[in-house]
Image (cartoon, rainbow, N blue to C red):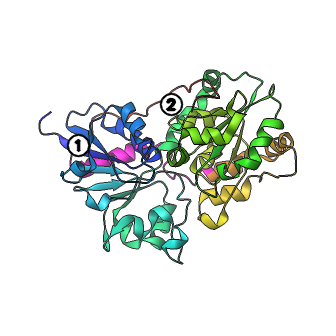
Amino acid sequence: MHDCKKVLVVIHTQVYGMRIKDLLVLFHGDLRVSVVFTVAPHAFNDGTERVLAALGGTVLPWQCAIATEFDLILTAGSQGMEQLRGPLVRVSHGAGHISLSRPADGPARAIGSLSRSYLTWDGKLVPRALALAHRADLDTLADNCPEALPIAEVVGDGGYDRLAAGLPHRDAYRQALGLAADERFVLICSTWGRGSAFHRLDSLLPRLLTELPGRQYRTALMVHPNVFSGHGSWQVRSWLGSATDGRLALIAPGADWQPLLIAADFIIGDHGSVTLYGALTGAPILLAQYPYRQVNQASPAALLARTAPALSPTRPLPEQLAYAAEQYRPQEYTAIADLITSEPGAFNRNMRRLLYRILELGEPAHRPETEPLALPKRLDAKEA
């Protein structure tokens, strides 16, 4: 099409790509907008090709992308963004601004994605706009990079909104997964790094395989795609050994995590975003790992760690799941989920307004769509 506004979607990792993918519905049907994609340099690039193949979009080589002027650039990452040409909008790649900057970055531990090192280059702000999920994020930004306050806009959290919209369809997701009505589905969620649940899998895995009766429980392990990117699927499966031979389903790194989270009867997790989103589902949560020195103590993930029971190495796992269910207080977890977004249900509306303002276009004359969650594949231990 002639005279289209040119939009560049920058994908650093599979997780960032899946996050950005949810924004593309905001451009559906608009003949005034042309979208292309590029893969930015990143240590965990592996897996981005699967996201792009599923989208079927035009992919520009990085060197071509940085040599081209765009009307809008969308990214969830920071690496290389100073090289791009055009107004750039940064969105979060997860929930709750959980992680602190690395100790190597300096003695003053900043909130990683809201720190100067992620938002500036040579002392100048790089993004044109910074999309935030919660009004409280403005206070966090003021402490970490106050010069970015004028470009910050509270739009909400798209992951929260899609998850909330999927909650009424729990029975359909469970049926698609092949779960019987009387089976209790235990979902193990792990982020990546030394503080993750996966890093402690040597102690957790035998318990999952030996302590949960197979006729009563179904278990699945959802590992952060960066683990697969860093080590490869073969290595991950090799570490799990025979566990995935019919006893523990290993979820593919590109699978949509939201229907699985909704279908779960219990969640065993860590400080990652997926575990945090679990506070919205009504499932009791057990924390297998919580690296408090790596976590922003003002984040909702830290509040979850102060609320959810911690997995004990000495008590039987069924007993601990029963205890988590007994102690579950919905109002406490609702309060945690409320800290993920201060604009529940409004992300698409607010985000489209922001993007079209930067594009200098009037918004399409219809309410922005919310894509429904697709039915998950049947649980299969050999999926990943």
Q: Is residue 19 above or below residue 243?
A: below
Residue 338 belongs to magenta span: yes
Identify the image quadrant of the C terminus.
Answer: top right
Q: Where 177 falls versus 101 (above or below)?
A: above
Kindly identify which residue carries mark 2: 373
For residue 186, what is the image quadrant? top right
Q: CA distance from mark 1 to mark 2?
A: 28 Å
Q: What residue span does the magenta drawing correspond to?
A: 337-365
Q: How far from the left and from the top, in percent, is residue 199? A: 66, 52
Percent position of residue 356, x then y: 27, 46
Towards the viewer: 312 or 233: 233
Which numbered circle lies on residue 181?
none
Identify the image quadrant of the N terminus.
top left
Secondary structure under the numbered disc 2 in the rendered image: loop
**For mark 2, does the 10 Å Cα neighbourhood hold few (<14), some (14 to 19), or many (20 or more) residues?**
some
Residue 193 x, y percent position in the rendering = 59, 56
Question: Would you name the residue on which mark 1 appears?
Answer: 362
Query: Measured along the vertical axis of the image, is residue 148 above or below residue 153?
Result: below
